[in-house]
Image: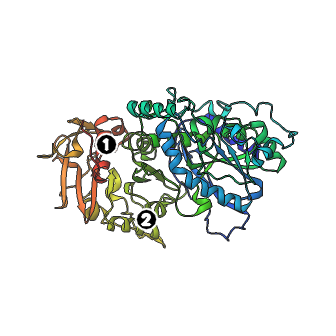
Amino acid sequence: MLERWSQRIALLALLGGAALTAVPAHPAMKEAEPAADTLNLVLRDRIPSATNAALFQVRERPQRWEAKNTAVIVCDMWDLHHCKRAVDRVQEMAPRMNEVLVKAREKGALIIHAPSSCMAAYEDTPMRKRAKDAPAAKNLPKDIGAWCNKIPAEEKGRYPIDQSDGGEDDDKEEHAAWAAKLAALGRNPKAPWKSQYDALKMDERDAVSDSGVEIWNLLEQRGIDHVILVGVHTNMCVLGRPFGLRQLAKNGKDVVLMRDLTDTMYNPARWPHVSHFRGTDLIVEHVEKYVCPTVTSDQLLGGKPYRFKGDVRPLAVLAVSEDEYQTAQTLPAFARDVVQDRLGVDTKVLLADPKDPNVIPGLAEALEKADLLLVSVRRRALPEKDLEAVRRFVAAGKPVVGIRTASHAFDAKGKPAEGRAVWPKFDPEVLGGNYSGHHGAGPKTTVKPAPEAEKHPILAGVQTPFVSHGSLYKVSPLAKSATPLLLGSIPEQTPEPVAWVNQCGKARVFYTSLGHPEDFQDASFRRLLANGILWALDKPVPSP
C-alpha cells in the first residue's frame, strides 16, 4: 500500500498546479451497518484532472478501518496560546473534538494526547507512563524524533500561504491586551502553554507524549497502521511535528487529517490575502494533494462536519458541461482565484462525466447544500433526478447565474433518452432571455452599458467599453422581468443585451452571454461575473 501511495504522490508532485474542486461519482456509502469496532470513513484527496494536468480533482474513497488498529493523535491543543484568536478557536472546537475522542475510544481506538512541551503536567500519570514504557520498535525510522519541514512530494507544489510572520491574526490592540493578561497570569506571552486544554478529557486507557519516538513505539507495539490527526495548527505543528502528518505519511502509516477539527496560524494581511478560514482551506488542499487524505468528524459522529461559527461563507455550485468555450478550464481557475479567494464564497465545481457529457456527477446532491448555482452547460439532457434538483433549486428561490451557453443549457436536440430530461424553456423562464442563435464568428463585440444601467451595483468597477472575443448572441427581446445591464454591438447589426438581471419568482438571476476563453483574461469581464455572483447572493458588491 505504501508503494502505491508513494507512486501516486510522486505523480502529483510532478504535475503540480492548482486545485480543482470537482467531485466525481464514488461508490454509494449506504452499505450494511459497520461493526461496532470499525470506523466508517470517506477519505478525500486530490488527483490530477483527466482533462487538465495543471488542475487537481477531488477524489473520495469509502474505507473501513478497524478501531483496534487505529490511533487518534491530538496535536497541540494547548490551554493557552500567544494568539488570542487562536485560543478562541481552540476553545470553540474542543467540545466537538472531545466527542470524537469519546466515540473513537468507545470503539477501541487508541487516543494519544500530544500537547508539545507540556509533559511535566502529566509526568506521574498512567497515560504518560504508557507512552514511555512502549518497547523500542525494530523499524524505528532514523529521523522520527525530528521536525519535518517538507517531504519530497511537496517539492513541485507551491506552498499556498505566507506564514512568515508567525500567522497571528489578532489586531494590534487585541494582541497587546492579551499579552499583558498572559504576563499577569505568570505565563510567558510568547509561549504560555503548560497543558492540554481541559475540555479534552483524558482517560486512563489513553497515552500522553510529544515524542515522535515514543509515539512510533506505541503504534508499533499495538499493530496500529491507521492514524487520524486532529488539532492545531495544520500549517505548522500538525504537518511538521515528529508525530505529524509528514513523518507518519513518509514512514508508511495510513494517516489522515480530520479537516474540520483543525485550524491554521494564518494572518489574512499576508499573501494570498484571503480570509483566515480560506487560508485553512488552502492548507487542507495542499495536504490532500501532496501529503495524505482527509476525513471529517461527522463520519464518526453523524450530522454535519464541524464549522466555526465565524465561518459563514455561502456555497456556490458550478455545473460545467459544454464543448465550445473551454469553461472546464476557465471556470475552476476563476472559482479558486476570484470566487473563493476574493469574494469569500465556497465553491464546488462539478465537471461532466468524460464518458457521458449529459451526466454531471454529484449535481443533485450538491444542490441540496448550495446557496447559488452557476450554469455553464450546452444542450444537455440530464438524468431526471438531476434536472428535477435544478427545478427545485429555482423554485426554492435560490440564486442562479448563467454564462454563455446557459441560455440553451438543457435544450438538447431530439428526444431525450429514457431516464433523461430536458428544459427547453430554461432560458425564458429562468434567465429571462430569448436565445435564437448567434451572429457569425469573427467580428469582436464592443460592450457598453445599457441606458440607465450605469449605477447598477453589478457594473461597479466594470470599465467600459471593453471588447469580447466571442460571437454576439441574438437574445432580444428579453422577458419583461429582466433588466439589461450591458449591450454588445458588432458592425452593421442591431445591438443585443449581453448581460442582464432577472427575477424568477423569489430567485435572483444574473446572466451574461459573454464567457469566451479570452473574456476571462479581461479584468472587466472578471469583475462583471464576480459582481453578478455577489448580487445574486444578495451580498454587498465592493466599490471599485
Q: How many labels does the image show?
A: 2
As measured in the structure, the alpha-carbon distance from the residue carrying label 1 to the one carrying label 2 is 25 Å
**Residue 96's disc number:** none
Residue 471 location (% of width, % of height): 29, 45
**Residue 211 against residue 223 in the figure, above or below:** above
Q: Do the residues labelled 1 and 2 touch (CB within 8 Å)?
A: no
**Residue 185 against residue 369 in the figure, above or below:** above
Visible residue check, residue 288: no
**Left or right, 94 with reference to 217:** left
Q: What element carries label 2?
A: loop
Which one is nearer the viewer's eye here, 370 or 374?
370
Residue that carries the numbered disc 2 in the rendered image: 381
What is the residue that sits farthest to the top in this orientation? 164
**Residue 470's disc number:** 1
The residue sitting at 42% across, 48% down in the picture is 310
Q: Given the image, on which type of amino acid does mark 2 rest?
A: Ala
Residue 76 location (% of width, % of height): 62, 40
Which one is nearer the viewer's eye here, 244 or 97?
97
Q: Which badge, 1 or 2, is on the more N-terminal residue?
A: 2
Residue 164 location (% of width, % of height): 51, 26
**Residue 370 against residue 17 in the figure, above or below:** below
What is the residue that sits farthest to the left in this orientation? 452
The residue sitting at 74% across, 64% down in the picture is 37
Q: What element carries label 1?
A: loop
Crowd around label 1: few <14 · some 14–19 · many ≥20 (10 Å): many
**Looking at the figure, which quarter contains the C terminus?**
top left
**Left or right, 7 with reference to 330:** right
**Left or right, 311 with reference to 519:** right
